[in-house]
Amino acid sequence: MTHNSRELLKLDGLSVEYRIRGGYLSAVKNVSMDIGRGEIFAIVGESGCGKSTIAHSIMRLLPDKNERISGGIYFEGENLGAYSDNQMTAVRGKRIGMIFQNPLDSLNPVYRSGTQVAEAIFLDKKDRAIVWKEVIDLYREMKMPDPDQRVRSFPHELSGGMRQRVMIAMMLARNPKLLIADEPTTALDVTVEAQILEIMSRLRADFNTSILLITHNFGIVAEIADRVAVMYAGELAEQGSVFDIFQSPSHPYTELLMKALPHQSKRAGRLQTIEGSVPRITSTSPGCRFYNRCPIASGHCENHDPPVRRLGDSHSYACHNR
Amino acid sequence: MMGAEDMGVCETGTGPMIEVSGLKKYFSLYGGFWGAVRKVRAVDGVSLAIDRGGTVGLVGESGSGKTTLARTILKLTKPTEGAIRIDGVDITKATAAQETKMRSEVAVVFQDPASNLNPRQTVESSIIRPMIIHGVKKSDARAKAREVMSMIKMDEHYLRSYPHQLSGGQLQRIAIARALVLAPKVIILDEPTSALDISVQAQVLNMLLDLQESMGLTYMIITHDLNVIRYFSDTVAVMYLGKLVEYGLTEDVVGNPRHPYTRGLMGASPILDPTHRGRVKDLMPGEPGSLINLPKGCRFFPRCDKASARCESLEPHDVAVGPSHTVGCFLYDGKKAGDKG
């Protein structure tokens, strides 16, 4: 495996299958992508497209023994798949941090929020007095109002936006190279969402942290992502720079999605819809997964996996008929 | 409750469909110091009118009173003060018969369809239930259920399904079907597409627009997605901590927001076009304050970067900044003495 020093995380043909009654469900199939240092990379797609599964397999957080993972996950050139569980524990938090949609699920209700952030710093074996000061500094950096008081607040005393700030502070305390943010602002008001997005872009600017953003919100993608991967039913439909995806979508699915977004007023016409629904896909199903909903599908698409076509440096899509 | 003399009954068919004037809804909080009762002023003096066949979009952060306003219009809670006229009838003073009629005329669709349909009942019994309550014969109700299924473009066989067998988009369409069965004049849509994927959101929004055209429905839509508001509604009402801070045509409020809060809200809202990134945004600091300890003057004062001294002590009133565009802010007050907005 050649390692390019610019790239931080590389997925090489990642497939994840979940065991179901009488077989395996293919949640992610043959996904390859790479995330550069200091890059904000977004994975977008509708529910069930496998975007969270990718995030969880990078962190090795999937429930044991009920899934089959193949393909490579390389972080700073090292194959995470070859790591032991203990080695993985050292990676989580220290080298790759992760924040989730609902911070209340990740915070312990009976400890003060600051204590929980301090716990992360203690992992790096620092002195108690320094740690507490560091926590307050982190809160300040997160633009938390009254940081000196807020470190003493319990999670239930904080608003949703403040809780997400605590999570980012906790993650940042160990200064990981990659932050995986799984729907970080879905539960927040747009005004607070904008503040959190600003913090995330500043993280990248100040610490060169790479961010893998998992979201279904194309607005957020348009605002902060550098590159985008569009997933459909476990497959990578298209990836490219944010401008490629929004201005010249090449996969029929991406193209339809862009027209389904409410860009303007209803007077400009009805929105594009995508008829049909996502098929249930077992590991043995061949062919393009968008076949049953695709306006340009031909007979060939049903039984043959689509080829990946390249359009320049980082823009590629998987389709037979384009 | 009765008071038959001044029911405010005017002929139906003219005037706005919904007219809310000076509406207040306070909740009491008990158990303060020495059992003191504190008031939560969830909706505090809201007035607005929605034209027949029109769509008003209600926006604001959580806790701004959007849902309370909607619930009061649905008469799910009693207002503390003020009047709500639906098709000319003041529902706060309605007789029992008028209230029954009003309940068939105003329908609602909530955010999470899965939690609003009984998991142990088939789709059909959920759909026909409102009709049974309103005294429709069961056979007629069943026929009507099949009719509304075709209106929402779903096959009749789904009537025999249970909610867990359906997807989120299908459930939301069923919820809309149920709202339609009593042939309402008004539908209140409380975050109708927030739980849905983009392609399904497009289906539901298109369907709602088609239904509005064919049935002449009046909509009130509550959502935090400004892209949906811009697409879907004719007028926009912006709420902040129980007050209407700006109200006007969508293109005016979204295209040329005047209230500092609306500007902050519009600035924070992501735009679906990467070429607009890096635009100058009027981002607001902080989060909406508490409804319990409201500031004495303008409620937006603590977060406002354009605030002056009088904002701290005086409450602004509505100022017209254009034809049918009002803003509750001193910035546009001018020097017109005695102008009561």
Image (tube, coloured by chain):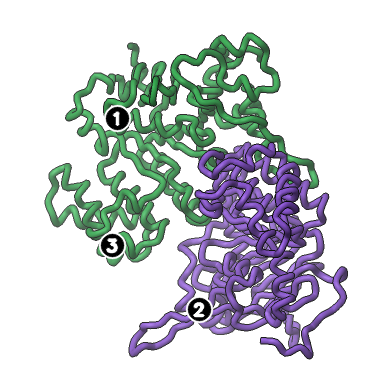
Chain colours: A green, B purple
Q: Which of marks 1 and 3 is nearer the N terminus?
A: 1
Residue at horizontal 69 percent and vertical 46 percent from the top = B205
Secondary structure at numbered mark 2: strand
Secondary structure at numbered mark 3: loop
Q: Position of residue B279 (x, y in %)?
A: 60, 47
Residue at horizontal 47 percent and vertical 81 percent from the top = B28
Q: Mark 3 packing: few (<14 Cα in 10 Å), some, or many (20+)?
A: some
User: Does the CB distance between marks 2 and 1 fall below 8 Å?
Assistant: no
Q: Residue A206 carries which label?
A: none
Chain letter of the residue carrying label 1: A
Residue with the mark numbered 1: A60
Question: Relative to A223, is B38 on the left or the right?
Answer: left
Residue with the mark numbered 2: B27
Q: Position of residue B289 (x, y in %)?
A: 47, 70
Q: Do callouts 2 and 1 point to residues on the same chain?
A: no
Identify the image quadrant of the C terminus of chain A. top right
Residue with the mark numbered 3: A154
Residue at horizontal 61 percent and vertical 19 percent from the top = A291
| In the rendered image, the vertical position of residue A23 relative to residue B218, given as above or below | above
| In the rendered image, the vertical position of residue A201 relative to residue A160, given as above or below | above
Residue at horizontal 70 percent and vertical 64 percent from the top = B134
Q: In which quarter of the image is residue A88?
A: top left
